[in-house]
Image (tube, rainbow, N blue to C red):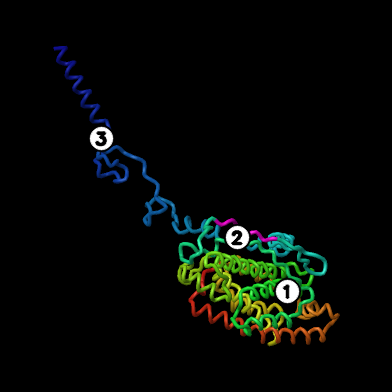
């Protein structure tokens, strides 16, 4: 009897336990996100909303994916542009960039202008050299195969712009148009004349653009000279005129259509043509009444804007903004005669007109040859 009551009491206690215990709610009462994907019904904490999701949890804070992703990138882009601008402005305005560029170009500044000491612009060592071959073919000829030491040093201290223009005009009156040796010698004088006679002292930022222009001319002269030496070695004779050398490169498939190999005679001729065209337009703008800054800026936009990168354009823009007045340039050009003011202007203008008249034919001949051969490479540098 006692045993039975004990069992009954245990049963009652068990029932009481089950009655007072809070029953588990069915799974449908919980959000689906609280249950694991395994299906066992174990409650899990809610996952935070993904910043990459277009939908947000009802309890999550508002979050803009566009703001979270694009804002840092936009800030970084703005900071990069500002850093470039500040760096270029510092280099061209405050730092001694003239001496830096001069040292790279192999030039040496001196009081009252630029003193050109004799130097050797060493070309890199080419590995495509092939000896003992006299026949000319695409497997034996390369404009890079001859190493050239650029050692031609010409004196331009007494050279006038009119005399320089006369030398260009003789390149078309000879039996062969644009003979190579005379062409390269005249171009060397042209590259050095501008820096010596048209850049007054104490205009460092303006000098930067002129130094880069001089360096560009001399480097392209060296490329043509190297290709000429290579032609002579593998063809067994000298190339007489410029187009003979260019046609040899085209026949040897040195270039890929209008994508020119560098270094080569083709790329050298192309950029020299652009230099001459640019200089002609500057003088024509002067003759039309524009000041120095506007003359350079208009000519640059017409000739180089499509072929230079943003950095190069920025450097030249700074150089043009720092250009001296045309009166200062004219007096510097005519300093050997001691001319000042209106007298210097009149003589300088006459020399510019003479140069334009004499050189225009050379520029047109080069343009004709470049367009006929389809080697006007549009690649930016």
Residue 305 point in image, percent of width and height = 58, 74
349 in relation to 67, above or below:
below
- Kind of element beneath mark 3: loop
- Kind of element beneath mark 2: loop
**Of residues 106 and 96, the one drawn nearer to the viewer in this rendering:** 106
Mark nearer the N terminus (1 vs 2): 2
**Of residues 139 and 222, the one drawn nearer to the viewer in this rendering:** 139
Residue topped by disc 1 = 193
Mark toward the viewer: 3 or 2 = 2
Residue 234 point in image, percent of width and height = 52, 65
Q: Quadrant of residue 3?
A: top left
- Kind of element beneath mark 1: helix
**Of residues 3 and 85, the one drawn nearer to the viewer in this rendering:** 85
Residue topped by disc 2 = 147
**Of residues 315 and 158, the one drawn nearer to the viewer in this rendering:** 158
Q: Quadrant of residue 35?
A: top left
- Mark 2 surroundings: few (<14), some (14-19) or many (≥20) residues within 10 A: many
Residue topped by disc 3 = 23
Residue 277 point in image, percent of width and height = 62, 79
**Which residue: 62% across, 59% down?**
123
Asked whether, in this view, residue 21 is left or right of residue 2, the answer is right
Mark toward the viewer: 3 or 1 = 1
The part of the chain drawn in magenta is 120-126
Asked if residue 90 can be seen in this view, the reply is no
Residue 216 point in image, percent of width and height = 64, 68
The quarter of the picture where the C terminus appears is bottom right
């Amino acid at each position: 009897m006692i045993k039975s009551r004990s069992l009954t009491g245990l049963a009652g206690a068990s029932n009481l336990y089950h009655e007072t215990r809070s029953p588990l709610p069915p799974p449908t009462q919980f959000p689906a996100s609280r249950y694991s994907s395994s299906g066992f019904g174990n409650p899990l904490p809610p996952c935070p909303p993904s910043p990459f999701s277009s939908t947000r949890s009802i309890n999550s804070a508002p979050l803009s994916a566009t703001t979270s992703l694009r804002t840092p990138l936009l800030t970084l882009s703005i900071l990069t542009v500002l850093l470039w601008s500040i760096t270029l402005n510092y280099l061209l305005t405050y730092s001694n960039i003239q001496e830096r560029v001069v040292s790279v170009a192999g030039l040496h500044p001196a009081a009252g202008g630029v003193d050109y000491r004799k130097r050797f612009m060493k070309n890199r060592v080419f590995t495509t050299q092939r000896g003992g071959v006299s026949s000319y073919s695409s497997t034996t000829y390369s404009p890079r195969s001859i190493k050239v030491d650029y050692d031609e040093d010409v004196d331009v201290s007494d050279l006038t712009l009119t005399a320089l223009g006369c030398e260009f005009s003789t390149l078309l009156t000879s039996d062969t148009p644009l003979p190579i040796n005379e062409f390269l010698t005249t171009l060397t004088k042209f590259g050095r004349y501008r820096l010596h006679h048209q850049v007054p002292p104490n205009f460092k930022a303006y000098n930067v653009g002129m130094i880069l222009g001089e360096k560009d001319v001399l480097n392209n002269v060296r490329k043509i000279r190297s290709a000429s030496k290579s032609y002579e070695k593998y063809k067994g004779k000298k190339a007489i005129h410029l187009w003979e050398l260019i046609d040899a490169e085209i026949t040897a498939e040195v270039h890929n259509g209008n994508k020119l190999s560098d270094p080569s005679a083709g790329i050298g001729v192309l950029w020299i043509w652009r230099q001459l065209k640019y200089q002609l337009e500057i003088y024509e703008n002067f003759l039309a009444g524009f000041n120095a800054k506007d003359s350079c800026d208009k000519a640059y936009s017409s000739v180089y804007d499509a072929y230079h990168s943003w950095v190069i354009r920025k450097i030249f823009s700074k150089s043009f903004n720092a250009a001296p007045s045309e009166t200062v340039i004219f007096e510097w050009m005519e300093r050997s005669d001691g001319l000042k003011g209106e007298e210097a202007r009149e003589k300088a203008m006459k020399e510019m007109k003479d140069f334009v008249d004499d050189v225009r034919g050379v520029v047109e001949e080069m343009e004709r040859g470049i367009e006929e051969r389809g080697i006007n490479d549009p690649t930016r540098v």
